[in-house]
Image (tube, rainbow, N blue to C red):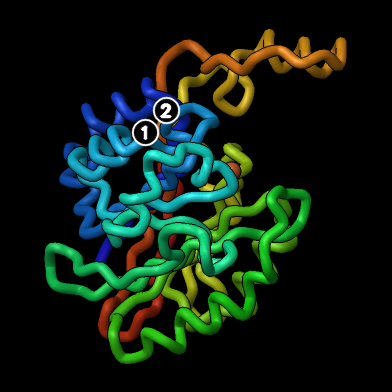
Amino acid sequence: MRILALGDVIGPAAVEYLTANLNAWRKQYSIDFTAVNAENASFLAGISPDAAQRLLAAGADVLTGGNHTMQTRTVFPMLDGDSRILRPINFPAEVPGYGSSVLTSAAGVRVLVINAMGNAFIEPVLDNPFPYIERALAREKGNYDVAMLDFHAEATGEKLAVAHAFDGRLSAMWGTHTHVPTADAQVLPRGTGYVTDLGATAPTGGILGVRADIICERFRRKIPVPYKPAEGPVRAEGAVFDIDEKTGACRSVTRVSL
Ligand SMILES: [Fe+2]
């Protein structure tokens, strides 16, 4: 099976872009399952129910989250009621929503999707993600054919540590959150397809999806300036994982910039 994973969707223009193009890309790359990190779909303020509905209707099979997911409270009922929308699994248990779910691809492959958040240089500082990922794999044992993980984290070393710790037990793992794609797409020794960060689905020309002059002003003068979305054409960064669904091993990982 072929999985398309796309990096952090930032703002309405990026939602619009996926709505217009995602189904065509699915056909072009013979994609069976699409995972989209959507924690910033409402531009650095989480994901609204409307944005979530639009991304799912556009062809996303699962929407993963991160440190911004819980900022829009109107999405809480959807987090509890729709297993296609995840928030990091290592949030406190009383927080709405779930951090993993088993979904079925159009071809009938059972896909366990896990979403977890790192601890280094990112807030809120959640519980250690390792035991949560371990427990999700154990809990769903026998219920899935392939497992994948969106690890939302800042530090490259932490992402690589999780990848090597779970190598061979995940078919695919990718990092999100930095909004900058990394050039290290690879199949790890025991068969997990991996890339440290997918990048973002965002307007180009700014800084991590935000208008460049605003970020420069914040760094230069150290005074708060409200964020506004970058302008310019949108680009979607991500990766395609080619997976043998019989063994769960990844055959290849290819970066895409769409
Ligand atoms: Fe994030």
- Residue 189 or residue 41, whichever sits in front: 41
- Residue 185 or residue 227, whichever sits in front: 227
Secondary structure of the residue carrying tag 2 is: strand
Residue at which label 2 appears: 235
- Residue 257 or residue 161, whichever sits in front: 161
Residue at which label 1 appears: 258
Q: Is residue 224 left or right of residue 56?
A: right
Q: Is residue 243 left or right of residue 94?
A: left
Q: Residue at x 27, y 39 (%)?
A: 55
- Compared to 232, does 59 lie above or below? below
Viewport quadrant of the C terminus: top left
Residue 230 picture location, percent across and down? 53, 15
Badge 1 vs badge 2, beta-carbon distance below 8 Å: yes
- Compared to 95, does 187 lie above or below? below
Q: Is residue 144 left or right of residue 194?
A: left
Viewport quadrant of the N terminus: bottom left
Query: What is the quadrant of residue 228 in the picture?
Result: top right
Rendered-image quarter of ligand 1: top right
Residue 106 visible in the current orientation: yes
Total marks placed: 2
The kind of residue tagged 2 is Arg
Q: Residue at x 19, y 65 (%)?
A: 105
Label 2: few (<14), some (14–19) or many (≥20) C-alpha neighbours in 10 Å: some
- Compared to 48, does 123 lie above or below? below
Residue 123 picture location, percent across and down? 71, 48
The kind of residue tagged 1 is Leu
- Compared to 196, does 68 lie above or below? above
Residue 164 picture location, percent across and down? 63, 75
Residue 151 picture location, percent across and down? 56, 59
Residue 237 visible in the current orientation: no
Secondary structure of the residue carrying tag 1 is: loop
